[in-house]
Each structure stands twice: as C-alpha cells, then as structure tokens.
Image (cartoon, rainbow, N blue to C red):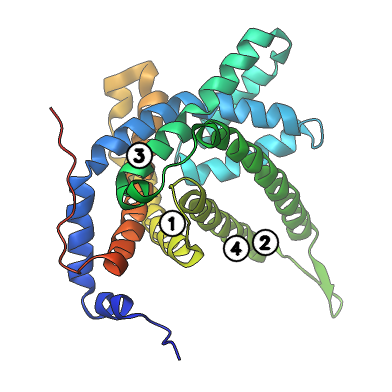
Amino acid sequence: MRTILDPHALYIAKHPGRFILQTLKAFRANQGLLLAGAVAYYALLSIVPLLILIVIALSRVVPQHLLLASLAHLLRWLVPGQSNALVQELANFLDHRAVIGWVLLLTMIFFSSLAFTVLENAMSLIFVHRVVVRRRHFLISALLPYCYILFLGIGLLIVTCVSSALETLGAEGIELLGLHVSLQGPSRVALYLLGLAGEIFVLTSIYLVMPVGRPSVKHALLGGVVAAILWEITRHVLVWYFATLSQVSVVYGSLTMAIVLLLSLEWLATLLLFGAQVISQYERFGREPIEARQPTIETG
C-alpha cells in the first residue's frame, strides 16, 4: 500500500529550507532572471495585440463594455496599477477598428504569439531533464501559442458572464424576513476568489502545457499555487510602491506606463519561472540523488 507522501516529499517536508535553497541555486544556475527579462520583453510586445484580438472576437457575442470591464478587473492581477490605463488605450484602438486590414491583422496575430513561444523556450531550459528524454515536434510548438490564445479567449468569456452575474446579484440583493439584504460585500469577495482561482488555474495550465514531456497535475498545481501566492504578495507591494514611493513618472515621463508594465511583467515572469523551477527541482528529487548537482547554463 502506497503512502500519501513519497520519500522525496517527506524529505522536503522535513527540510523545507534546504529544498528552497537548492531551488534558488538551481534558478540562478539556469539564468532565471535573464530568462524572465526575455519573457517580460516579449510579453510587453504581445499583450496589446493579444487583448485586441480577444476582445474583437468576443465582442460579437458579448457587449464590448462588459468585456472591457471584466478585462480591467483581470488586468489588476496581471499589471497592478496600470489596468485602467491599458484598457483605455485598448478602447481607443477598438473605436477605430475599421482601419484594421489584413496586414495589420496578421501582424497582431504574429506578435500575440511571441510571449508564449519565448516562455516555452524558457521552460525547456528549466525542464532540461525532460528535454533530454523527449523533444517536442516543431509543429506542436508552432501551434501551441495560438491554441493557448483560443483558450484564454474562452476563459475571458466565462469570467465575463460569471462576474456580470455576481455584480448583478450584489446590486439587487435579496429579501430576507422582509428586510433587504445587500450582497455587495459577499459578491466582491466572490469576485476576488474567482480571480484568485482563475490565476491558479492559468498558472497550473501553463505548467501543464508549456514544458516538454508528460506533465503531472499534482506537480503543476504545486507550482501554480506557489507562483500565485508569491504574485499576490508581490502585486500588492507593487501597487503600494507605485502609489506612494515610486518616482518613475518623474524620470520616464510619457514612457511611464510602458516602464511600469515592463517591471510588472518581469516580476510576474520571474515568479512564473520560479514556480517552474520548484516543479523541476521536485521532479529531479524523484529521478536523481537528493544532493545531485544542478546542471548550469554557460554563456559567453
């Protein structure tokens, strides 16, 4: 009869500090910050075309103002403090959607996939033990970003419908023993939990889909929860920092939004790749001796 925790999980539970230290060393050996910078740069190039394509497609099913409202709510998790400005720029572009031609459309489709391609390559460096065993066909790598964009669009549609229903319920309230009880507070809590659950789901799906090899749902969920918790802490710190201490607007002027977006995306990419490193390190514990040396990436 198998135990709930395997020997490697028991070792990690007994020595969490050693596991975290080894994971940090492995992340540094894999040039994690450099990889995060590359992912953040291409994510900055991809985010606007990606959002435009999704909103244009879904606006045929759902009113545009509802989509933009849900998008603003979700972007608070992705780019703290800049969601309203980003949605405003997106709305301005959509007001002139008639100028979108085939060349511009194809260009946006190409740029919207760049972040996913770079993220897949970064994941392959972190999960190098999987790549050695099995490589992914180039056609799958080429189509994977567009499949993920499709699923993100479906996710935004579901979130829009659910959040609209929750907001309506919170505004109307219920009648209880002849008294009107407002549900605005519970609906806000439900929206927050919905966003947090969606965040964990998206991160878990990335860990399931992007790396090469047969994924483990348990390991992917572990990485998703770790990355989500770290990002929840980080995004609140970023909101506080940009609102109180930051002088970025004085230094960068009109480039402020781009710089803040890039910084937020780099932090998110760092935590995303660190969550992948946690999964990779756990898997290596199952295949290699606990004290095995982490392969390093040499540059120059």
* Residue located at (61% from left, 58% from top): 194
> How many numbered marks, from 0 up?
4
| Circle 4 residue | 189
Instruction: Give me the residue at 45% from left, 23% from top.
Output: 45
Looking at marks 3 and 4 on the same chain, the residue that comes earlier in the sequence is marked by: 3
- Residue at the image point whose x is 45% and y is 39% from the top: 81
| Crowd band around label 2 with a 10 angstrom C-alpha radius: few (<14), some (14–19), many (20+) | many
Say if mark 4 contacts mark 2, CB within 8 Å: yes
What amino acid is labelled 3 in the image?
Ala
Q: Position of residue 258 (x, y in %)?
A: 40, 24
Q: CA distance from mark 1 to mark 4?
A: 17 Å
The residue indicated by pointer 3 is 122
Q: Quadrant of the C terminus?
A: top left
Distance, label 3 to label 2, CA atoms, is 38 Å
Q: Give the quarter of the figure containing the N terminus.
A: bottom left
| Residue 260 appears anywhere in the view | no
Q: Which residue is at the front of the view, 226 or 187?
A: 226
Side (left or right) of 78 relative to 256 = right
Name the disc covering residue 228, or none: 1
Q: CA distance from mark 3 to mark 4?
A: 35 Å
Q: Amino acid at mark 1?
A: Ala
Depth check, mark 1 against mark 2: the one in front is 1
Mark nearest the camera among 3 and 2 is 3
Structural distance between the alpha carbons of marks 4 and 2: 5 Å
Q: Position of residue 96 (x, y in %)?
A: 69, 13
Residue kind at label 2, given as amino acid type: Ser
Image marks 3 and 2: residues in contact by CB distance under 8 Å: no
Mark 1 lies on a secondary structure that is helix
- Kindly report which numbered mark, 1 or 3, lies closer to the viewer in this rendering: 3
